[in-house]
Amino acid sequence: MNEYKLDKLLHIRTGAGEKLLYPESIQYNPYEPTPYSALETLFKNYEMGKDDQLVDYGCGKGRMNFYIHYFFGISVKGIEMDDKFFQEAIINQRNYLHHTKKNGDTIEFFCCLAEEYIIEPNDNRFYFFNPFSVTIFRKVINNILRSVENTKREIELILYYPHEDYVYFLENNTSFELIKEIIRPALYERNPDERFLIYRLLY
């Protein structure tokens, strides 16, 4: 199913191929939704349980959140710093819930800086599509680690199009360990960044 048809199925508008630069801050990267075809590849090879709760950093208009919520019934949260995108995510949420009759208590959006989001004890899956610099990534990961100190639980990170600085930091400065690599067939051969990396926190 193509991008347009999936947006239509979910009753959302997420702007396939749209990008927007943030000239006021070099710490944040352009908006680009994860392709639906990439999400399909990910979830053919990666499972989450009904009790998992995913946080999408730099969620934009919420595509990842709605996709997971609709097809897998997983609790999801989207963190977005840009007010315009946040408002569009809220409009998408309203349309999505109205037409699908899904549980609105398990999908939330927050308009704040990534490093300012207060991680809750049930947050245990975290998604990154290169939303910001490694400086902010470090702060977010440290927030996750502090949360685990207070509430022990299994934590996994999902990185799409993983930036080498993210990978270096995780593998050299944390207890996260790579447990799975999921490549996008046909695309990976031409572009080795077309993959997902799954990291799990080791105690």
Image (tube, rainbow, N blue to C red):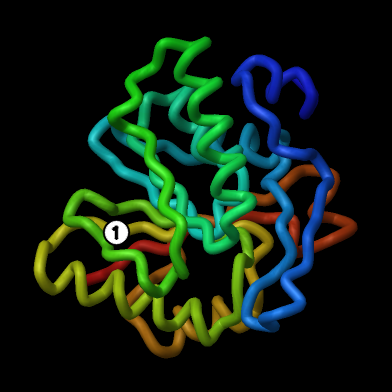
62 lies above or below 160:
above
Is any part of residue 125 visible from this angle? yes
Residue 89, quarter of the rendered image: top right
Dot 1 amino acid type: Ile
80 lies above or below 131:
above
Residue 28, quarter of the rendered image: bottom right
Q: Left or right of 169: which side holds 24?
A: right
Residue 174, quarter of the rendered image: bottom left
Residue 135 position in % (x across, y down): 52, 86
Closer to us: 96 or 202: 96
Is any part of residue 197 visible from this angle? no
**Residue placed under numbered mark 1 in the picture:** 155
38 lies above or below 12:
below
Task: Pick out the residue farthest to the right.
Answer: 190
Element carrying mark 1: loop
Q: Left or right of 56: which side holds 15?
A: right
The residue carrying pointer 1 sits among few (fewer than 14), some (14 to 19) or many (20 or more) residues within 10 Å by Cα, namely some
Image quarter where the N terminus lies is top right
**Residue plotted at (33% across, 36% down):** 75
